[in-house]
C-alpha cells in the first residue's frame, strides 16, 4: 500500500527535525517541499538546516537517469541530515524559473522511488502550493514552464502583458486580484497556461506514469504568533553572518537581484546592506519582519485544508503524540 506522510506548517516550527525523527522511527526518507530550497548555493539564507559539509548524493547528475528525468538543468539527488536522505533540495541554479508543476513531476518520481524501496516518503515543508500540486494535481499546475515563450514575454511591459492575457483568456483576467494583475511574473505564467490550453498542449510528462497514493496523513505544526516571531528572530540572528557571505558570493557570480530565487526572504535587505543603502541592524530587522509576514501567509494557506491534523509545538510531549498518530496510521 502506497502511503504518504506530509509534515507542514509555517517556518520555524521544527518541521525538518520532526521529519528526521519520524523517518528514523518508521524507516522513511524526506522529500523537501520548500520553494526557496530548490536553488543551489542558497543554503543559509533559505534555512536548509543541512550542514554545508553534507555533500549532494549521488554526484555527477544525481538520480536523473534512474528517475527518468530528461531536463538537464535539473539535478535530483539528496543530502543527508542525521543520516536521513532529504530529497528535492539543490535542484536548479538560481537563475532558473522553477514552477510548482515541475516540482510536482519531480516529487512524484522521487516518492515512487521511495515506495519501490519499501520505505515511507515524508514530504516536509512550508510551501503549500508545492504540497497541493503533489497531492491534488490539476492540469494547469502541471503545465511546465516554457523558457522560449517566457523570454519573449519578459521583454514586454506590464500593460502589454495585461492586454495579451485579456485577449487569450478574459475569464482568467477577471478572476485575478489586483496584486496579481500588477505582477509581471503572475501575468506571464497565466499567459503561458492560456497559450498551452489554446494550442491543446495539456498532455503532461507524468501522464504515462500515473501517481497512485493509497493513504495520506497530513500533520501540521503551529504555535502562537508571539512564539513564532521569537523563534524566527532567533533563527535570523543565527544566520546573518553566513547569509551575508552567501548573498555576496551569489552577486559576485553574476546573479541579478530580480531573479525569482532572490525573492526569498532576506536577500533584498542583505543586498541593500552590501550596497551601503541601509545599515546592518536595519537589514536584519526588515528580514525578520519579512519572515513574520511569510509565516502568517503560510498559516492562512494551510488553515484552508481540513485534512491537516494540527499540533501545537508548545504542547507537552507533542512529538510523541504525533509519533503515536503516525504509528496507528502506518501500521
Image (cartoon, rainbow, N blue to C red):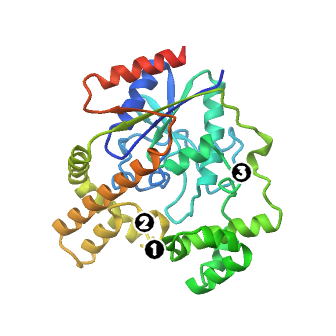
- Location of residue 325 in the rendering, given as x and y in whole percent from the top left corner: 44, 20
- Location of residue 196 in the rendering, given as x and y in whole percent from the top left corner: 76, 65
Residue at x 57% of width, y 45% of height: 132
From mark 2 to mark 1, how far is it between C-alphas? 7 Å
Seen in the picture, residue 23 relative to 276 is either above or below; the reply is above
SS for dot 1: loop
Residue at x 48% of width, y 53% of height: 35
Q: Dot 2 surroundings within 10 Å: few (below 14), some, or many (20 or more)?
A: many
- N-term mark: 3 or 1: 3
Q: Which mark is residue 258?
A: 1
Q: Viewed as shown, does residue 216 lie left or right of 209?
A: left
Give yes or no for contact between labels 3 and 1 (Cβ–Cβ under 8 Å). Answer: no
Of labels 2 and 3, the one closer to you: 2
- N-term mark: 2 or 3: 3
Q: Which mark is residue 70?
A: 3
Q: Which residue is mark 2?
A: 262
Q: Dot 1 surroundings within 10 Å: few (below 14), some, or many (20 or more)?
A: few
- Location of residue 134 in the rendering, given as x and y in whole percent from the top left corner: 60, 43
Residue at x 35% of width, y 53% of height: 296
Q: Viewed as shown, does residue 294 lie left or right of 242?
A: right
Amino acid at each position: 500500500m502506497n502511503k504518504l506522510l506530509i509534515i507542514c506548517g509555517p517556518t520555524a516550527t521544527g518541521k525538518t527535525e520532526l521529519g528526521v525523527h519520524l523517518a528514523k522511527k518508521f524507516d522513511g526518507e524526506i522529500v523537501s517541499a520548500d520553494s526557496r530550497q530548490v536553488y543551489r548555493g542558497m543554503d543559509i539564507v533559505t534555512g536548509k538546516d543541512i550542514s554545508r559539509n553534507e555533500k549532494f548524493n549521488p554526484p555527477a547528475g544525481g538520480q536523473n537517469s534512474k528517475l527518468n528525468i530528461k531536463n538537464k538543468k535539473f539535478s535530483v539527488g539528496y543530502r543527508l541530515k542525521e543520516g536521513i536522505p532529504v530529497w528535492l533540495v539543490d535542484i536548479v541554479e538560481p537563475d532558473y524559473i522553477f514552477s510548482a508543476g515541475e516540482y510536482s513531476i519531480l516529487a512524484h518520481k522521487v516518492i515512487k522511488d521511495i515506495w519501490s524501496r519499501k520505505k515511507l516518503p515524508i514530504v516536509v515543508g512550508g510551501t503549500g502550493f508545492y504540497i497541493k500540486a503533489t497531492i491534488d494535481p490539476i492540469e494547469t499546475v502541471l503545465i511546465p514552464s516554457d523558457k522560449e515563450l517566457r523570454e519573449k514575454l519578459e521583454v514586454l511591459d506590464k500593460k502589454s502583458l495585461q492586454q495579451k492575457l485579456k485577449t487569450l483568456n478574459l475569464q482568467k483576467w477577471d478572476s485575478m486580484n489586483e496584486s496579481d494583475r500588477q505582477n509581471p511574473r503572475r501575468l506571464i505564467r497565466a499567459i503561458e497556461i492560456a497559450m498551452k490550453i489554446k494550442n491543446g498542449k495539456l498532455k503532461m510528462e507524468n501522464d504515462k506514469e500515473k501517481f497512485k497514493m493509497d493513504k495520506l496523513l497530513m500533520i501540521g505544526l503551529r504555535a502562537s504568533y508571539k512564539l513564532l516571531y521569537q523563534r524566527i528572530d532567533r533563527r535570523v540572528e543565527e544566520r546573518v553572518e553566513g547569509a551575508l557571505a552567501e548573498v555576496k558570493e551569489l552577486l559576485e557570480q553574476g546573479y541579478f537581484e530580480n531573479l525569482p530565487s532572490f525573492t526569498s526572504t532576506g536577500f533584498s535587505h542583505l543586498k541593500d546592506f552590501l550596497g551601503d543603502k541601509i545599515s546592518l541592524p536595519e537589514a536584519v530587522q526588515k528580514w525578520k519582519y519579512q519572515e513574520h509576514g511569510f509565516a502568517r501567509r503560510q498559516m492562512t494557506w494551510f488553515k484552508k485544508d481540513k485534512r491537516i491534523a494540527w499540533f501545537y509545538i508548545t504542547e507537552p510531549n507533542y512529538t510523541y503524540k504525533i509519533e503515536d498518530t503516525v504509528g496507528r496510521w502506518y501500521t
